[in-house]
Image (spheres, coloured by chain):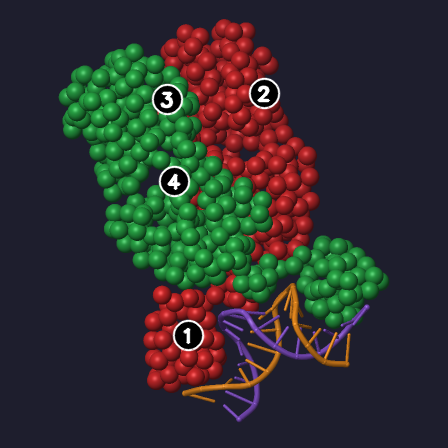
Chain colours: A green, B red, C purple, D orange
Amino acid sequence: MKKKITLKQIARELDVSISTVSKALRDSIEISEDTRQKVQAFAKLYNYRPNNIALSLKNRKTKTIGVIIPEIVHHFFSKVISGIELVANKRGYNVIIGLSNESFDKEVINMQMLANGSIDGFILSIAKETLQQQDYHHFKETINQGMPIVMFDRIVNEIHCDKVIIDDLKGSKNAVSKLLSNGCKNVAIITTKDYVSVGKLRTQGYLEALEAYEITPDTDLILKVDDELVSDDRLESLEREIEGLFQNNKNIDGVFAVNELYAIIAMKVARNLGMKIPDDIQFIGFTDGVLSKHATPSLSTVSQHGQEMGEAAAKLLIDNLERDDEEERYTTIVIETELIERNSTK
Amino acid sequence: MKKKITLKQIARELDVSISTVSKALRDSIEISEDTRQKVQAFAKLYNYRPNNIALSLKNRKTKTIGVIIPEIVHHFFSKVISGIELVANKRGYNVIIGLSNESFDKEVINMQMLANGSIDGFILSIAKETLQQQDYHHFKETINQGMPIVMFDRIVNEIHCDKVIIDDLKGSKNAVSKLLSNGCKNVAIITTKDYVSVGKLRTQGYLEALEAYEITPDTDLILKVDDELVSDDRLESLEREIEGLFQNNKNIDGVFAVNELYAIIAMKVARNLGMKIPDDIQFIGFTDGVLSKHATPSLSTVSQHGQEMGEAAAKLLIDNLERDDEEERYTTIVIETELIERNSTK
DNA sequence: TTGTATGCGTTATCAC
DNA sequence: GTGATAACGCATACAA
């Protein structure tokens, strides 16, 4: 078959000018019916498609969105991507992926790589390391260069841009309230260190729920895990930590975990310790994924609606990109969480 | 701060020509030490970065790889992406994602969108619908237009290109042999319809393992599920099908499933039927994911090494892209599978 | 109705 | 040592 063909080649072949071809293909009325047909036929025959790169250069927009996420082998993030891709494609945009791997340097490098003309705007969720170092200059610079950013899930107030989040506080407060209203008297929480904004907020929701039930929080029941990174060694030590939690607090009858994996592991430990779920102890996790659905017993979770978050983020970004006025008004969309009750709660 | 700056603007600002600036920035010896320093200082100050799009247009290569996969919310595919991204970035390439959603049309459209200059080559895994319709013209056309393709996992012999696969036959034969050597006498298989090439091969491996143990296959023990698509209704009916399988064949003492989910569900059904795992019945799944690791009991699986597949595919593609000679020699890389023994087998 | 010229940002070639 | 020019592929204002 034939190689990619350009306007110039068609023009030469048909012995007309490039602009005639261009116009003919765009159905311009300037061009005679005759040549128009001729050109279009030829173009179709050779399967002509305008070169995206040339168009991007000319229009100064690439019609592609850069997405930077900490990790892709992760149910939540892949759901988000899926949502982004859905609306992006619907509106004629491509999606280009960069993984930060939770590393500050990779986040910066990836953004630089993409910011030099490859994309029109970013959708991103901040790497743990960046959150820890609290160094956000790369976001600021990107925005100052006129490239819009939409942050989702892991955001930071310091940066002014569009944001899509869930109400972590409310979601976890609901979850813990559910445990309490189900009769739990001693609810433990397994959470992350405070620099992860969502971990902090979810812990706060836990505390507020307790307060609403007039229960004084017991610091012994708050387990702050050092890192969310899922290396196998970490998992084993996590198991031991959780085991310690249960053994030192025999009265625990409810557990709220800020992510799915922590909850699943906690259930496993509890089961090994001979506890019956949900009779002796009930569990709720945050972030709904495959694990929750197929665990035994299936885990009740707070669903983040990752796909919707992705859709909202993409819509926000594209709307911004295609808006004429230069007015800078950033909006924050809050996606409602949903408590999915399964068999780990009564 | 400042907007994106171009060569032209620097030139104007410093009152030199564009080409002088260009050369100065590339440390050309043609340029005097003096102006070179001046230009470089100015460029650094204004954080100049060459525009990727312009470079792409000039060099006729974009340094980006297009990846088309059926689904991203899937442990295996996200692992592959992760691997692709790793080597791509290391070699200065970006990765752009298209999701086919197992649909033929979306696969075609996505490829067209990207093939018009946005990328240098494809890495892809074929959509189920495409496999079913056996319409591969879009692959042929892409290749004929000079755009290389690397296929992984779901491939098709009819198309000549680089491929990365696992030895599905050997992997499943090993798995089933394991069950047999563990003492299973009646091993069932839960597989897909034959048009999914990997499903077919894995079924064949099952049959060969039986043959090696001189067991005549019993068609009652071969359950061919209609679709791998994970809609919730499908899952329920799948459960019922599997339940039927067990009830009609009370002697089943081993199950091999061609994916993780089927295995997990089968385990659940077996447990509900009162069978003890792995004492009464043993399970092995194909495709290692989070589910296998965290199921109760944890599931023994055949790991596909998705990340490695992605790395191999990216390496194959980039090597091809950067190779000078025009010689067309396609290679197929076979990634070794690995049987990971967990608690669902003795 | 058709064609010419210009520009998007860059680099390479060649002239000064 | 510096600069003008062409080219990558396309669209478009303007000229013929």
Instruction: Report the disc number at residue A165.
Output: 4
| Alpha carbon separation for disc pair 2 and 1 | 61 Å
- Bin the neighbour count of mark 4 within 10 Å (Cα to Cα): few under 14, some 14-19, many 20 and up: many
| Residue at mark 3: chain | A
Q: Position of residue B5 (x, y in %)?
A: 43, 70
The type of residue carrying mark 2 is: Lys
Give the labeled residue for mark 1: B26
Q: Residue at x 38, y 40 (%)?
A: A165
Label 2: chain letter: B
Relative to B187, residue A157 above or below: below
Cα separation between marks 2 and 3: 29 Å
Q: Nearer the viewer, mark 4 or mark 1?
A: 4
Pointers 2 and 4 in contact (C-beta within 8 Å)? no
Callout 3 and callout 1 share a chain? no
Q: Could you tell me how far apart the alpha carbons at marks 3 and 1 are, in whole angstroms? A: 58 Å
> For this view, does A314 lie left or right of residue B200?
left
Label 3 sits on residue: A299
Secondary element at tag 3 = loop
